[in-house]
Amino acid sequence: MSFVMQAIASPKIVLKVPAGGKQSAPLAAARLSLQKGALSGRSLTLLKQKVARSQTSSSSSSSSSSSSVCITAHHALLPPRVVAPSLPRILVYDHCPFCVRVRLALGLKNIKHEVVFLANDDIDTPVTLVGKKVAPILERKDIGLVMKESLDIIAYFDENPEWGPTGAFAPSSGRSDIKAWQKEVKDTLRLLHRPRYMKASLPEFQQQDSRDYFVSGHPVPPFEKPEWKALPLERQWALYDEAMAQSDKLIPEINSKLKKLDSMIACEHYATVGGLSYDDIDLWARLRSLTIVNGLVMPPKLATYMKNLSEAGDIPLYHNMAC
């Protein structure tokens, strides 16, 4: 099968070193490589790994600091456009972070694809395709392929050279600091964004049946699913309204927590030293939902990180519908 690989503008890469910092040998070599010509695809991935190894040898911390080396890959650095004769089709919900993982990965890999937003109460479509109500789902009608599980779908595209340069994303680092932060804010995030999903004009919630279906299956803290399921729908909606009414208290709390996260981000283009990784695929997808909160204030580095990956991955943030 032959795909169309459309070349785009030459990449612009900036390697940042702290003021007064010493330039390592790998970093010096990287600068020389950039002077000789633009890097892309696998060459860029290898460069990222080389610089990351250099920094790792001088610091045992995987979290960011003011001395981090930042390989700034502007969205013009995207690999050549991949256009298959029959576009891969992904079935998703716009709000779902697991769905956003796949959309972000395909965007960063510059793979043209078809996005289908399922109604939230559409059970028949996913059950027919994969046997259960889940998203995301990859469907390739040309070869009869159907696949679920976000990370499996991403691996399918990133490990197959037919879809452009492989190895675009480093493996997950397993960072305990980011995982601890996510656990710390889990309840706050649900109280903030779940009621707002019902007020924003998201494609999966265009009808009341879809909104009712979501509310009936997604509790707001402190409720867990078993006790939530026992409540009548009217009471569940009332609790969503009560959660929304806590915004004046919750928004300052999350703004404070975001300052803590900001210090963990390596730079404005990726979360973990060494370049784009599955850390970004997961973290950015989860943080995107927060941009639906009116009054949210992300620190400058984190805000720029969100903007950069939004542009590079071709997925809009929710600022224009924040409530």
Image (cartoon, grey):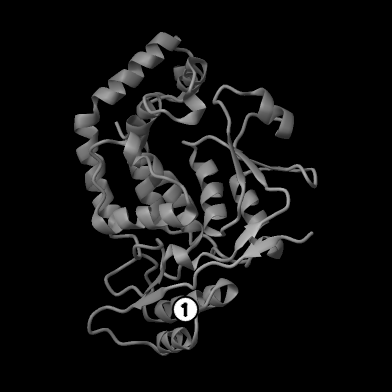
What residue is at 42 percent from the left and 66 percent from the top?
Answer: 74
The answer to which quarter of the image holds residue 237 is top left
| Category of crowding for the residue at label 1, using alpha-carbon neighbours closer than 10 angstroms: few (below 14), some (14–19), many (at least 20) | some
What residue is at 40 percent from the left and 29 percent from the top?
Answer: 197
Q: Quadrant of the image for the C terminus? A: top left
The answer to which quarter of the image holds residue 185 is top left
Percent position of residue 72, x then y: 39, 70
What residue is at 45 percent from the left and 68 percent from the top?
Answer: 275
- The amino acid pointed to by label 1 is Arg
Percent position of residue 56, x then y: 42, 76
The total number of labels drawn is 1
Q: Quadrant of the image for the N terminus? A: bottom right
Q: In this view of the protein, which residue sits in the foreground, 188 or 46?
A: 46
Residue named by callout 1: 53
Task: Tell me: residue 205, above or below residue 97.
Answer: above
The answer to which quarter of the image holds residue 15 is bottom left
Is residue 5 left or right of 94 when viewed as pictured? right
Task: Tell me: residue 14, above or below residue 118.
Answer: below
What residue is at 31 percent from the left and 35 percent from the top?
Answer: 322
Secondary structure under the numbered disc 1 in the rendered image: helix
Q: In this view of the protein, which residue sits in the foreground, 230 or 131?
A: 131
Q: In this view of the protein, which residue sits in the foreground, 222 or 270?
A: 270
Percent position of residue 169, x then y: 54, 63
Percent position of residue 211, x then y: 47, 20
